[in-house]
Each structure stands twice: as C-alpha cells, then as structure tokens.
C-alpha cells in the first residue's frame, strides 16, 4: 500500500496530522509534510510526494486521506485507488 500527497493542493487544515503520524505540520509554509515522502511525477498534482505505508498503519493512512478537506491525499493498493 502506498500514499500519495499533493503538497500544492494542501490548505493547511492539518487533519491528516491528527490522523497519522506520517504527516507533520510545517507552520512556516502553512502546509502538512509527508515524512519520508519522495517527490514523484503524478498526473493529478503539481507537487506530489509518495511513500509506502508501513504494516499496521493502513487504517491510519486511510483516515488521513479521508480527513483531508481538499483531497490532497490518496491511498493506493496494487495500483488501485482506495481513498
């Protein structure tokens, strides 16, 4: 399972930070940060970061994605978008 996060779309509500510790606050930029996220080219966002979801954190990743008010977070498994 992997998570993709578009930092450009993020509006800094930080619900994802409350749901999963893979996200942290960047108060200076007013955006969340996906810890250990690597920049990737994606057709859905301008500044997309991606990382694998560790075993046992799948539910937290899904909650983080569902909590984002601007859909800046997506969760995929085996190439299929779950959230």
Image: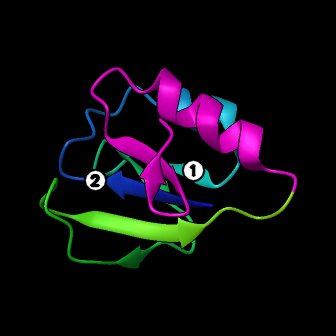
Residue 10, image x, y percentages: 27, 40
Residue 62, picture quadrant? top right
Residue 17 seen in render:
yes
Residue 69, image x, y percentages: 34, 20
Q: Which residue is mark 2?
A: 7
Within-10-Å neighbours for mark 1: few <14, some 14–19, many 20+: many
Residue 70, image x, y percentages: 27, 26
In this figure, what is the number of numbered marks?
A: 2
The residue depicted at 74 percent of the width and 47 percent of the height is 58
Residue 72, image x, y percentages: 31, 40
Within-10-Å neighbours for mark 2: few <14, some 14–19, many 20+: some
Report whether 5 appears left or right of 6: right
In space, the residues marked 2 and 1 are separated at their CA atoms by: 11 Å
Report whether 55 appears left or right of 80: right
Residue 52, picture quadrant? bottom right
Q: Is residue 46 magenta?
A: no
Q: Note whether 23 is above or below 13 in the view shown.
A: below
Q: Which residue is mark 1?
A: 23
The residue depicted at 55 percent of the width and 63 percent of the height is 78
Report whether 32 appears left or right of 35: left
Residue 26 seen in render:
no
Element type at mark 1: strand
Q: Is residue 77 magenta?
A: yes
In this orientation, which residue lies closer to the viewer: 63 or 23?
Answer: 63
The residue depicted at 50 percent of the width and 53 percent of the height is 76
Q: How is the image coloured?
A: rainbow
Q: Which residues are magenta?
A: 56-83
Element type at mark 2: loop
User: Which numbered marker is on residue 44?
Assistant: none
The residue depicted at 56 percent of the width and 50 percent of the height is 24
In this orientation, which residue lies closer to the viewer: 45 or 35?
Answer: 45
């Amino acid at each position: 399972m992997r998570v993709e996060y578009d930092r450009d779309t993020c509006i800094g509500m930080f619900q994802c930070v409350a749901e999963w510790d893979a996200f942290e606050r960047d108060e200076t930029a007013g955006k969340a940060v996906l810890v250990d996220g690597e920049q990737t080219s994606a057709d859905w966002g301008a500044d997309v970061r991606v990382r694998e979801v560790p075993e046992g954190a799948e539910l937290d990743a899904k909650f983080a994605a569902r909590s984002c008010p601007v859909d800046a977070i997506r969760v995929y498994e085996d190439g299929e978008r779950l959230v």
